[in-house]
């Protein structure tokens, strides 16, 4: 199928689903109170952007996502590198890291709210905990799997310990950060929105929380629509970044290894 | 830094570049079984000499190079470089590995410049010299591509430039051309001989290909089948230099040498084959 035809059918599918939703609600097969009305949802979304009402919330959610990602990836990179190069520390900490990783970390949100307040930092903290482990495990695994041959070669070419870190471990660890980029940016976003949803004064999650309190299901759907569009935009930005940074990497076109 | 010492070097000519004396090398497998790769190995590479080591597969050829490079230490016996026992990495040696050891995240030119950067040469100078070396191995203008964009033969050339740019006194080569197709291989062998003739290094060249060994080397050492490999025999290759590899293959002297060495090697190859068969 040509791309044009494919695009046409994709749009058709979307239109069909929305129309079905509309008709089901219109003929009261589904109660509008619980399922909303697509026309109103689009109208609400349009109004948000037209009046500019949404921008401060959008800005805050994006800012939180960005900071959560940068901090989480930074700590993950540092921690993963450090632990992978310290066999003693890694065997000592291994069970605790496993425990922390298997814990459903979203449940830390109330604790972060108490520690960091209802401002942006409690959301960032939640995003960081999600991103950290993804990046951490990727880097940890990546450093341990650095090709012994590349290492031996670098040593034969005269690299000292610091140069090995700079020219072998760090670049290969960074490549693993980038290979988990889609997952980690996505999780930063999830952490932040969940944080907002559980208690905040601004952000898209806050809008949804408020609308839910008023049983305004259409606004909830509008919030979800905005979040979805935002997630898609973030994902395509990540793909672009990946292409420019990982030009050398044949792996970059594939999806990230397991989260 | 190896640059200031030419082939004549500071060391007296009487000392061999590399000497293995009664070297044993035993590995412990994960299940605790000791495997003796080398037993009582004696081997010498004179200054400026090209020595090829041939032997059946799995006879510990790579172990010999890792010992000479200082990546391994012998269980007993002694490895010395210019008469001085080797401790730690062999700083006089460049090592051309069998598999591809290039850094995938560095372009060809940055891979070649790597060793110079490690030695504190500033980046413009290092890249200038790397450009010259890329041209020397026939890759002029390909400096900005990444290893995965190069063919196997081209990656081998980059590795060769990466090793030789440091002008090591000793070059260790582990079946460097075994993964290449026949045409590329002949080209690379010719190039290697040309570079070697221009600036005589001591070369320890490991291969399983007897023909290649005879064509390139001054001396061919035949190894016994593993475990417990040792040198079975040595053959002086008195073919004149410079050599034209394509023509040399058809000369009677080459055939005689090939025949003589093969007589010694044959039994070991059969022995090794039988072992692999019974194991597998």
Image: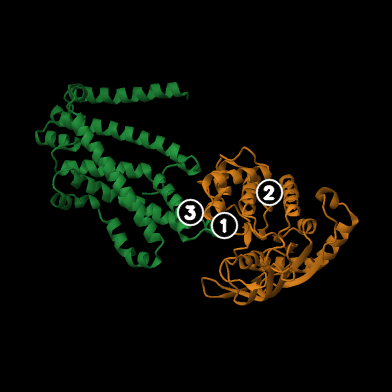
Chain colours: A green, B orange
Density class for disc 3 (Cα within 10 Å; few <14, some 14-19, many ≥20) is many
Q: Is residue B29 above or below residue B52?
A: below
Density class for disc 2 (Cα within 10 Å; few <14, some 14-19, many ≥20) is some
Residue A185 on image: x %, y %: 32, 42
Give the farthest residue toward the left.
A214
Q: Is residue B204 above or below residue B226?
A: above
Label 3 to label 1: alpha-carbon separation: 12 Å
Q: Is residue B257 above or below residue A238?
A: below
Between marks 2 and 1 in the image, the one whose residue lies nearer the viewer: 1
Q: Chain of mark 2?
A: B
Residue A239 on image: x %, y %: 40, 36
**Do labels 2 and 1 touch, CB within 8 Å?**
no
Give the farthest residue toward the right.
B252
Density class for disc 1 (Cα within 10 Å; few <14, some 14-19, many ≥20) is many
Query: For this view, does B129 lie left or right of residue A140?
Result: right
Numbered mark located on residue A168 in the image: 3
Q: Is residue A73 above or below residue A225?
A: below
Residue shown at the point (77%, 64%) measured from the top left: B220
Tell me the residue that label 1 is attached to.
Answer: A157
Residue shown at the point (9%, 33%) measured from the top left: A214
**What SS does tag 1 mark?**
loop
Numbered mark located on residue B180 in the image: 2
**What SS does tag 2 mark?**
loop
Q: Where's the C terminus of chain B, which quadrant? A: bottom right
Label 2 to label 1: alpha-carbon separation: 24 Å
Mark found first going from the N terminus, 3 or 1: 1
Residue shown at the point (48%, 44%) measured from the top left: A251
Residue A257 on image: x %, y %: 41, 48
Q: Nearer the viewer, residue A188 or A227?
A: A188
């Amino acid at each position: 199928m040509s791309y044009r035809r494919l695009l046409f059918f994709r749009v058709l599918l979307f239109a069909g689903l929305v129309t079905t939703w509309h008709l089901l609600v219109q003929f009261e097969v589904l109660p509008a109170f619980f399922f909303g009305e697509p026309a109103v949802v689009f109208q609400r979304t349009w109004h948000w952007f037209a009046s500019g009402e949404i921008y401060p919330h959008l800005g805050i959610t994006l800012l939180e996502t960005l900071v959560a990602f940068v901090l989480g990836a930074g700590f993950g990179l540092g921690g993963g590198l450090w632990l992978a190069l310290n066999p003693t520390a890694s065997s000592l900490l291994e069970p605790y890291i496993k425990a922390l990783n298997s814990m459903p970390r979203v449940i830390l949100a109330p604790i972060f709210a108490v520690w960091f307040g209802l401002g942006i930092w409690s959301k960032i903290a939640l995003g960081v905990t999600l991103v950290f482990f993804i990046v951490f495990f990727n880097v940890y695994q990546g450093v341990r799997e650095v090709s012994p041959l590349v290492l031996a070669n670098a040593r034969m070419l005269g690299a000292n310990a610091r140069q090995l870190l700079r020219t072998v471990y760090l670049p290969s660890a960074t490549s693993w950060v980038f290979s988990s980029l889609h997952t980690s940016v996505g999780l930063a976003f999830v952490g932040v929105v969940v944080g907002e949803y559980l208690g905040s004064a601004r952000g898209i999650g806050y809008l949804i929380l408020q609308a839910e309190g008023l049983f305004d299901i259409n606004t909830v759907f509008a919030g979800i629509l905005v979040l979805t569009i935002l997630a898609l935009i973030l994902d395509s930005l990540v793909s672009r970044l990946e292409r420019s940074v990982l030009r050398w990497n044949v792996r970059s076109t594939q999806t990230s290894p397991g989260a | 830094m190896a640059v200031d010492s030419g082939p004549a070097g500071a060391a007296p000519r009487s000392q061999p570049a590399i000497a293995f004396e009664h070297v044993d090398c035993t590995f412990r497998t994960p299940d605790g079984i000791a495997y003796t790769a080398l037993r009582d190995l004696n081997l010498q590479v004179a200054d400026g000499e090209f020595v090829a080591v041939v032997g059946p597969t799995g006879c510990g050829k790579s172990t010999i190079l890792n010992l000479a490079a200082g990546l391994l230490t012998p269980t007993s016996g002694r490895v010395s470089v210019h008469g001085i026992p080797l401790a730690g990495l062999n700083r006089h040696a460049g090592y051309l590995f069998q598999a591809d050891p290039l850094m995938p995240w560095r372009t060809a030119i940055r891979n070649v410049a790597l060793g110079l950067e490690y030695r504190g040469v500033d980046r413009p100078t290092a890249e200038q010299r790397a450009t010259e070396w890329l041209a020397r191995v026939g890759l002029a203008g390909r400096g900005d591509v990444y290893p995965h964009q190069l063919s196997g033969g081209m990656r081998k050339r980059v590795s060769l430039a990466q090793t030789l740019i440091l002008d090591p006194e000793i070059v260790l080569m582990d079946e460097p051309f075994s993964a290449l197709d026949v045409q590329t291989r002949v080209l690379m062998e010719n190039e290697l001989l040309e570079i070697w003739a221009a600036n005589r290094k001591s070369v320890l060249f490991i291969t399983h290909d007897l023909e290649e060994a005879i064509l390139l080397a001054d001396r061919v050492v035949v190894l016994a089948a593993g475990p417990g490999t040792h040198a079975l025999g040595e053959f002086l290759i008195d073919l004149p230099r410079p050599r034209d590899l394509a023509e040399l293959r058809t000369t009677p002297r080459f055939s005689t040498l090939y025949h003589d060495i093969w007589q010694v090697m044959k039994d070991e190859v059969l022995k090794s084959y039988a072992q692999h068969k019974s194991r597998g």
